[in-house]
Image (cartoon, rainbow, N blue to C red):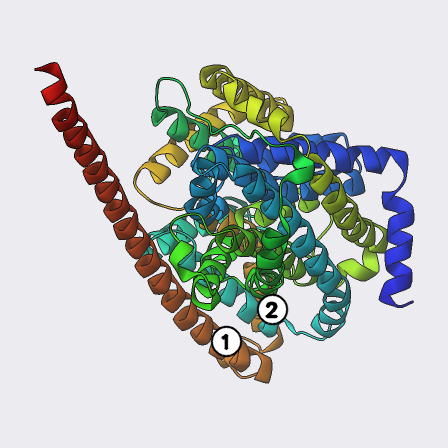
Amino acid sequence: MDSIDLLLNGFATALQPQYLLYALLGVLVGTAVGVLPGIGPAMTVALLLPLTYTLDPTAAMIAFAGIYYGGMYGGSTTSILLNTPGESASIVTALEGHKMAKLGRGAAALATAAIGSFIAGTLATIALTFVAPYLADWAVSLRPNDYFALMIVAFVTVGALLGSSPLRGIISLMGGLLLGLVGTDVTSGQQRFTFGTPVLADGVSVVIVAVALFAVGETLYVASRLRRGPISIVPVTSGWRTWMSRDDWKRSWKPWLRGSAIGFPIGTVPAGGADVATFLSYAAERKLSKRKDQFGKGAIEGVAGPEAANNAAAAGVLVPLLTLGLPTTATAAIMISALQTYGIRPGPLLFDSQPALVWALIASLYIGNLVLVVLNLPLVGMWVKLLQIPRHYLYAGILVFAAFGAYANKFNYREVIILLVLGVAGFFMRRYGYPVAPLVIGMILGPMAEEQLRKSLMISQGDPTYLVTSPFAIGAYAFLLLVMIAGLWLRHRQSKLEARLAAEDLATREREAISVDAQVTEGSHRSGPQEE
């Protein structure tokens, strides 16, 4: 059965009323958390992981995918109207989008972001539909040493390229690997790193770690940095039917396509995810635009391209997740832990062992994209009102739900204690610049890598050269070297672009201040003789 037939079967499942409801709830919640600054899709999926105790796998994954996509959509709203990105991948959108809003063109900025996200998300999902099955068929032929090489690629690239410092990322990854070793060794039956504590004999739950780091730790960090006083929001005055002029459409459609082409392949490899894709798209649009003078002052291309790259990368992330079982973002890592809760192991056999789940999930992405563009265009006023929720109520509610979820894991109060300890650790990690995503990814992939390493050594009768002698393993390590060089180069370009934009913004503010002072001085000179 080819991909088209399988996709049609997926639509037959995804269009059932209960799954449509979960898709709708997912994109609603995702858009809401994308709008609220400091609450991203990773935190939300982590917070809702206890739902996996009651929902069937298809419903849970459809809801989580909706949250993921919705978070990417919703982040543009606060970036444009508030100049505060709802999640990190929307930082670039704020550069031009907020300036457009201040010029009275916030409606056009919101429209090009929403439509570009829909087009890019749909194109990337089409690519996922046709690329993923072939990649899964090929991955079935991989041997244990090949899989171990893939794990090493994921470890090093995720540790070095997620976060601002490669060293801190690797340290975070090592912490995750250590947590993954806690518990009882399957082969020998011996307890490892439990310190004689019975509650650790079964290991540390990935659900607890994810909720602690992404919900408790992030909430404590964001709450500690909350600004006080009223929030200044740029209003959107024009109706949604007149948001984009013909010139806006003409200037946006090429950035939408270019952003899709940039975002999808970057999302499929662990090279920084959507953050890198958005900065690359912005740099490309700035270079290719015929109106370079408008960049830094509210260029619509600077919103259209990065938002398209953002959502295309989100679909690209699902390719290695579903076909190889490799997460390249924090949200993908938590979705893997959700599948593991059901006893489902993502990887090349997933398309054969769980075809109904996989194709219903892919079909739900098409449906979710359509629902999201309907929600984001006419209902933007409703999303903006979410910003008026008192933050202390919001974050207190998150902590309460996190505690309930931890207790529901084993109905043991010790789980709540572990949650709080790891949550405080997550707060200090964020405080001192240690990324939490490599820790979770290391904890999830660590036991898998250990299993493949043991299989490889058993096959080779303890010969370690077996790990690096297969053609695929050699290619994987060569690919690792290329990705590291390319990723660090992209990070360097991103840092230079950020510094340049900061310098331009400072110069603009100084010019505006000088202009205001000159007007005040001129006004006082004019009024002086009249007063005499």
Label 2 sits on residue:
147
**Mark earlier in primary sequence (2, 1):** 2
Residue situated furthest left in the rendering: 532
Identify the residue at horizontal 44%, vertical 39% (top origin).
103
Q: Is residue 249 above or below residue 135?
A: above
**Nearer to me, 274 or 309:** 309
User: Does 287 sit above or below residue 68?
Assistant: below
Tell me, yes or no, if residue 19 can be seen here: yes
Residue placed under numbered mark 1 in the picture: 479
Q: Taking 292 as reference, is 71 left or right?
A: right
- Where residue 85 appears, as percent x and y from the top left, is 46, 39
Residue 41, position as x, y percentages in the image? 57, 39
Which residue type does callout 1 highlight? Phe
> For the point 40% across and 53% down, which residue is it?
174
Nearer the observer, 313 or 322: 313
Q: Amino acid at mark 2?
A: Tyr
Closer to the eye: label 2 or 1: 1
- Is 29 drawn above or below residue 322 in the view shown? above
Q: Residue at x 51, y 37 (%)?
A: 209
Relative horizontal placement of residue 285, taking residue 461 as reference (left or right): left
Real-space Cα separation, disc 2 to disc 1, in angstroms: 14 Å
In what element is the residue under mark 1?
Answer: helix
Snapshot quadrant of residue 385: top right
At x 72% / y 62%, what residue is drawn? 128
Which disc, if any, is residue 178? none
